[in-house]
Image (cartoon, coloured by chain):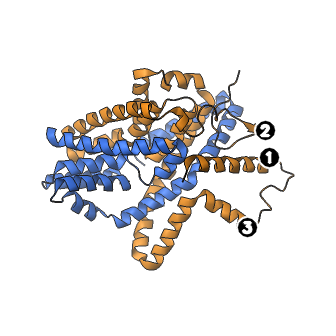
Chain colours: A orange, B blue
Amino acid sequence: MSGSGKRGNMNNESVKRANGTSGSGTSGSVQKGPMKRVARFVGRNKLLVLVAGAYLLLAVLMPEKAAVAFQSSLYYLWEMVQVLPVIFVFTVVIEAWIPKSVIMKGLGEKSGVRGWLLSMALGSLSAGPIYAAFPIGKMLMNKGASVTNLVIILSSWAVIKVPMLANEAKFLGPQFMAVRWVLTVFAIFLMGWIMGKVVRREDLPGSVSETESREIDGKIVAGDTSLPEEA
Amino acid sequence: MDIFTILFWVLAVGLMAFSLIKGKDKTFKAMKRSKAMMGSMMGQIVAIIFLIGLVLAFVPTETIRAVLGGDTPFRSTLLGAAIGSVTLIPAFVAFPLIGSMLAAGADIVPAVAFLTTLTMVGVVTFPLEQREFGRKFAISRNVMSFLLAMGIALVMGVIL
């Protein structure tokens, strides 16, 4: 479960993968035994394998429950299919066209209250559930966004959405919605501020020193998303 | 698809076109990196999605109704916040559910605790959050969100 250890493994895997694909003449991963490939897949997707196992077990023991679970998962799967391509485009555009200096100035350690407000706006103009915020957050983190602003983006992404607020006002009343919204915004700023004090940038995986983009055999190392300092 | 999702797609297509026109090579290079980053998250995300289905199969809305409407407010609040943390229910299901409960005279505090942890605390997304942002970040964010959700619920109970 150790975050850093896992990260290390992952990076090794990515390096291996990058090497494998770059050298077209070398045997690479193609000739690896099927058992080894299965083992590697399992190692990388522990949660997925665990969940698949749970479904199999459930399908045998309580088939109706398994069907219900699968059925409701399909709704979330459809939600993901709708949102992830958009998130992908956003990360590409941030990666390609927004220089690190701009992110650092707008969302970095010294961005102050303006950075908070910008983060809140970014998070509020969001699409999809909180996991959709992870790739964007990761990208911004690698480009120098502060911990405080990262927390504000992730949290407001999950909580503050115009369609959601409209829905809340409809079913629970405008007053209920407005009070909860104000309290939540306050809570998010408070949490961002405290977390900015408690969590250092060094606590984040692959931050600053590690993220300087490395290239191996002309291939970009997977998972490393920081922009190389280009002239 | 709701109007907002459609708007985001329009925006995404526009941005992609802009990016390709502005610089093809740079766009493709960025695509490769984003693909690597998001590709490494995909297994987890698919796992999360099917995990949500599992959780919902075992914590159906009747259970949520029973828990939030419990006789001891403190216990209901704590349990409500806990259930909100492990489930990810879409807003259009959660709001009508809570709305009907409040209309029937249920206590507001457990309901708000549930609504707030529902979106802010993610137990099923925790492994992914931990991997991408570090253990300390993920634990602090989720624990603090849980506590703040309880705080928001209590304050709302006093105000409304």
- Decide: few, some or many residues near mark 3? Use Cα within 10 Å; few <14, some 14-19, many ≥20: few
Q: Is residue B56 above or below residue A94?
A: below
In this view, the residue in front, B32 or A212, is A212
Query: For residue A95, which quarter of the picture?
Result: top right
Q: Is A110 left or right of B74, judged from the image as shown?
A: right
Q: Secondary structure at mark 1?
A: helix
Q: Are marks 1 and 2 in contact (CB under 8 Å)?
A: yes
Q: Is residue A125 visible?
A: no
Q: Which disc is residue A22 wearing? A: 1
Q: Which residue is mark 3?
A: A34
The mark found on residue A136 in the picture is none
- Label 3 residue SS: helix
Residue A218's disc is 2
Q: Residue at x 58, y 22 (%)?
A: A101
| Residue ID at (24%, 36%) | A178
| Residue B18 x, y percent position in the rendering | 60, 30
